[in-house]
Image (tube, rainbow, N blue to C red):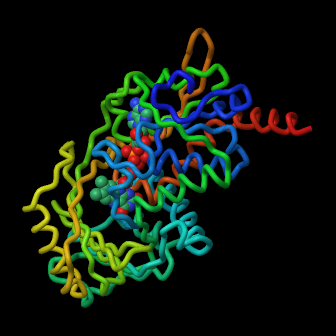
Amino acid sequence: MHNNSSNGQRVGTSAAAAGDAIVIVGAGIIGLDVALVLAERGLGPYITVIAEHLPGDTAATYTSPWAGCNFSGISGNDKNALKWDRLGYTHLTKLASEQGDEAYIRRTHSVEYWDEHVPHEKIKAISEYLEDFRELPSHELPPGVKFGISFTTLTLNAPKHIEYLFRRLKEQYGVHFVRHRFPTIQAAYASPTTKVVVNCTGIAAKTLPGVEDEKCYPTRGQVVLVKAPRVKRNIMRHGRDYETYVIPRPGTDGHVILGGYMQKGSSDGSTYSYETESIVNRCLKLCPELQQFDIIASFAGLRPSREGGARIEREEIVIDGKKKVLVHNYGAGGTGYQAGYGMALEAVSQVDDVLRDLERASRRARL
Ligand SMILES: Cc1cc2nc3c(=O)[nH]c(=O)nc-3n(C[C@H](O)[C@H](O)[C@H](O)COP(=O)(O)OP(=O)(O)OC[C@H]3O[C@@H](n4cnc5c(N)ncnc54)[C@H](O)[C@@H]3O)c2cc1C
């Protein structure tokens, strides 16, 4: 398959053929987290990540570089979201401790406010694992806020974090990357040695032939990158029809992301000065340390949302008369970084049988 790709960066020699056994379509945080989970299991040399966009690129249809980015209480209240968040928090906390600087992740104090009541089960679930969790007493809440918490969160420099994963997967684990855009999901099985394809195509899952999931929709967000070295903490306010947040960026010279918007159904990748103005005004009210700042740039990104939450599901498909395995892992919405590792563990667990066969073959080859 790779020989035929006009803009592919790797070729499929017989020595490299085993590298096609697992094909991950998509190199956003979701595809990279799947590659990491598999690589940590010793399967790095069997993985090829194939994507139209790779870390370092920017495009309206490539969401991951635009994220804020932190762990927050923004997720849904369903069991899956709560489970993936918990696994993600544990993973990111460990990464922050062991390789925080290289991975562009930092432990950061965070305060979150809600203008409406938050379901009790959700708060109970996150209070069990968030470090330094505290429910704020009413006298600490700003006017109009019904509920607030503080805890130690993880903040990430999103574009740098995916570049770190890209480097680490290649250099430490021998994962191959190819730049290529598939016309259909079935096209990802072009190599006869491919046993399993993991579909991590983000918002493209709505339109990609062979997937065409009608439940998917984009949720647009605009953010503003500023220089404000006095800001050292996260602060977020979840309103009825707005979302305001201030997130310092690790590994920068005092850069901070200000947000934001949650515009369901909008696939507009443009930025607007009136939105920048609204974001800045809302953040100034929320965060007194923001008094002195310089605006660097505004960005817009499209969260890959899905009615009912992310889809992690195994499907058996027939390609050229042969049964093949496809695992879907898309629809992370606004939580791809915080939940991505947990989602990856679940996606990988769905193909455990195929992976065990590969592991056996690998052991035999080494004998
Ligand atoms: C403004 C904003 C703020 C956010 N803040 C946070 C935050 O604070 N915390 C958090 O956890 N999340 C946050 N998110 C959400 C997070 O960014 C997303 O959940 C995540 O990036 C989704 O990743 P993904 O890998 O599914 O999609 P993408 O990053 O879009 O990756 C999709 C990949 O699939 C490839 N692809 C698609 N179609 C094809 C094809 N046909 N052939 C080959 N390749 C294909 C693309 O090229 C790309 O490599 C934020 C998002 C936005 C927009």
Q: Residue at position x 31%, y 84% from top?
A: 229
Q: Residue at position x 70%, y 43% from top?
A: 43
Rendered view: 194 above or below 335:
above
Q: Give coordinates of residue 92: x percent, y percent.
A: 53, 66
Rendered view: 72 above or below 178:
below
Q: Quadrant of the N terminus?
A: top right
Q: Is residue 156 left or right of residue 95?
A: left
Q: Is residue 134 left or right of residue 238?
A: right
Q: Is residue 206 visible?
A: yes
Q: Residue at position x 34%, y 39% from top?
A: 203
Q: Give coordinates of residue 164: x percent, y percent.
A: 52, 59
Q: Residue at position x 45%, y 45% from top?
A: 54
Q: Give coordinates of residue 78: x percent, y percent.
A: 41, 52
Q: Which is nearer the eye, 87 or 97? A: 97
Q: Is residue 309 visible?
A: no
Return the residue found at the far right: 367
Q: Quadrant of the C terminus?
A: top right
Q: Which is nearer the eye, 9 or 44? A: 9
Rendered view: 319 above or below 178:
above
Total numbered labels: 0
Q: Is residue 310 left or right of residue 255?
A: right
Rendered view: 142 above or below 20:
below
Task: Locate residue 282: give its quadrant.
Answer: bottom left
Return the residue found at the far left: 274
Q: Which is nearer the eye, 213 or 194? A: 194
Q: Give coordinates of residue 220: x percent, y percent.
A: 23, 50
